[in-house]
Image: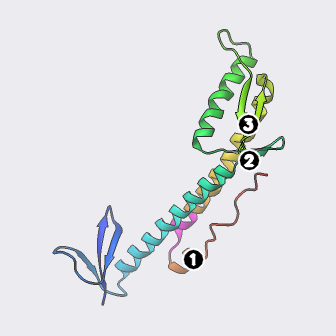
Amino acid sequence: MGIYVDLVNGKVTSRYSLKQYEGQTYYADGSPELAGLLLSDEIEKKCDAVDALHAVKQHEGFVFEGHRFEIDSGSQGKIGNLALRAALAAMGTPGISWMPLDFVTADNTIVTFATPAPFLPFANAAADAAQALFARRTALKFALRAAASAEALAAIDIATGWPVLA
């Protein structure tokens, strides 16, 4: 019977059993082209699921000195900027000062970094945690995109292997 598909940038955006308009792309059942397109479509869906899981893991955050901190992209930017300021202030760079910094944890408590010294290990731990999550996300997406069959794709468990950041 086959299917009619709409393609955008080589990716299936919709599928139909009946032709919707003239010029729509048709693939016969069992054709290698259709199998490749559908596999590619499923790979991208699973990659999107990895991205969503990565975002959840970032939101769950990491534990530092008994407190859980989020490491979503916005938090990473803030921590990175403040780490630079802390390092420069700790070195005594003229014109760079440090004021006590109140940082809100994932459970909405406040942790105060009174000086740059305790902030730097925190920023380092945040960077390590974010990088560990990014590395897992990247490894999964490379594995998914290397899948040569639906069976190989199904065998990749995207829920396991994430670093424990507790």
Residue position for label 1: 154
Mark 1 and mark 3: span between their CA atoms?
36 Å
Residue at 72%, 29% (x, y): give it.
102
Label 3: which secondary element: helix
Q: At which x and y percent is residue 111? A: 77, 33
| Location of residue 33 by image quarter | bottom left
Mark nearer the N terminus (1 vs 3): 3
Label 2: which secondary element: strand
Q: Nearer the viewer, residue 11 or 101?
A: 101
Other residues around mark 3 within 10 Å, as few (<14) / some (14–19) / many (≥20):
some
Q: At which x and y percent is residue 20? A: 22, 77
Mark 2 and mark 1: span between their CA atoms?
30 Å
Q: Nearer the viewer, residue 98 or 28?
A: 98
Q: Nearer the viewer, residue 152 or 69?
A: 69
Magenta-drawn stretch contains 17: no
In this view, 135 is above or below 13: above
Other residues around mark 2 within 10 Å, as few (<14) / some (14–19) / many (≥20):
many
Magenta-drawn stretch contains 146: yes
Amino acid type for the residue under numbered disc 2:
Phe
Q: At which x and y percent is residue 35? A: 40, 79
Q: Which residues are magenta?
A: 142-148
Residue position for label 3: 124
Residue position for label 2: 62
Residue at 70%, 59% (x, y): give it.
162
Q: Residue furthest front?
A: 108
Amino acid type for the residue under numbered disc 1:
Ala
Q: At which x and y percent is residue 55? A: 59, 53
Other residues around mark 1 within 10 Å, as few (<14) / some (14–19) / many (≥20):
some
